Image: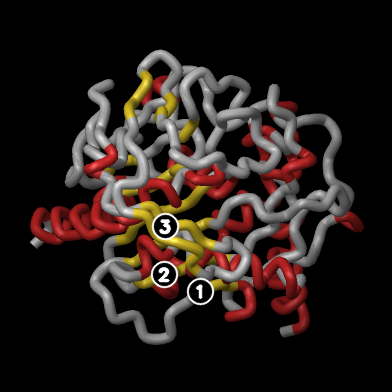
Amino acid sequence: MQYFLTAILFSFFSLCFALPVWAVEGNIEKSQPSLECIPACPDYSKDISWASKPINPQKNVDVFYVYPTIYPETFPKNMDVFDKSLRADVQGLLKAQAGVFSGSANLFAPYYRQVTFACLDQNQDMMLNSYFRIGADDVHRAFDYYLNFLNNGRPFILAAHSQGSVVLLDLIRSRFKDPKLQNALVAAYLIGYSVTDKDLKNYPWIKPAQKADDTGVVISWNTQEPGATGSPVLRSGATCINPLTWTTDETPADKSLNLGAVFFDDFNGTVIREVPQYTGARVDKKSGALITIPPDKMEIGHFPKGVLHKFDYAFWYRNIEKNVQDRIKAYLKKHK
């Protein structure tokens, strides 16, 4: 029995701290995290490791949501998932961003040791950052636990923003070649990061959304003003769909199609204001961006001028909310 317990503990800590095999083979930056700098590993068999885990799921569909970058510190380079202040920030995002999903689906959201923004190099593929991999591997483990113990055969949505979208793209690349997972996927909302033509070529199971009710697809856009440059999340060859029309051509969508922008205090989830017909949008094929001209001057944080990353959900909130409902209906009708 003692040997068995020792083996279990060894395996658990290996999962928490070991990098993937390919990291050792030179594909990840040479500077590897030291163990004393890595915050404690979440155990997804414990409720404390989940920001949201319904006790008695009532809806026919789940959503597995991964929150965006909220961790601002320079040391340690990964978020401590047991920090009370950071946990409160995540709870605010569950009410704000994840609110477009939680009305239609059972919300599952793991805490994960995301990398601080200060640690990321704009010129490097984020997925090759060894500190990023710590958080990404947390989400992989959380997803495994969700599938094995929480899902109970229900179809699911994947949803995220920013760093969370990078994590879920990494998950889809590595795991969704499996037809069973493809069949269970209603849609993946990977908003605020780029799913590129190269991704589609290298991972043929990634299929970009083309309309409002296709299923098993990946949905992506990056919002910015005309002429904006330097976005760290807009990659070459980015795919984009217009959340006002759910089309991928460059036809402008008038603001009259905007069902409502909803602005939240992201840190506590309270609604600041809701504005129907807030702004229109168009897809720019050359850059892959979603272009808009907001009527207000926006506080964009640390992003370059005109990059409206912070508002990827807010500007189109009610349209996303309705689209989630439409895709669920289409999926359930297709899989009767």
Q: Quadrant of the image for the N terminus?
A: bottom right
Say whether residue 186 is visible: no
Residue type at numbered disc 1 = Ser
What's the residue at 40%, 60% (across, down)?
274
Q: Secondary structure at mark 1?
A: strand
Q: Nearer the viewer, mark 1 or mark 3?
A: 3
Residue type at numbered disc 3 = Val
Query: Residues under labels 3 and 2: Cα distance?
Result: 20 Å
Q: Which numbered disc, 1 or 3, marks the residue that appears first in the sequence?
A: 1
Q: Secondary structure at mark 2?
A: strand
In which image quadrant can residue 219 be found? Answer: top left
The disc at residue 107 is: 2
Crowd rating for badge 3 (residues with CA inside 10 Å; few <14, some 14–19, many 20+):
many
What's the residue at 36%, 62% (across, down)?
101
Across and down, in percent, residue 129 comes to: 71, 36
Residue type at numbered disc 2 = Leu
Question: Mark 1 = which residue?
Answer: 52
Q: Secondary structure at mark 3?
A: strand
The image shows residue 245, relative to residue 91, as above or below, that is above
Across and down, in percent, residue 328 comes to: 21, 59
Question: Mark 3 = which residue?
Answer: 262
Q: Is residue 311 left or right of residue 156?
A: right
Q: Are marks 1 and 3 in contact (CB under 8 Å)?
A: no
Q: Which numbered disc, 3 or 2, marks the residue that appears first in the sequence?
A: 2
Query: Residues under labels 2 and 1: Cα distance?
Result: 6 Å
| Count of numbered labels shown in the rendering | 3
In which image quadrant can residue 83 be found? Answer: bottom right
The image shows residue 253, relative to residue 198, as above or below, that is below
Q: Are marks 2 and 1 in contact (CB under 8 Å)?
A: yes
Q: Which numbered disc, 2 or 1, marks the residue that appears first in the sequence?
A: 1
In front: 24, or 7? 24
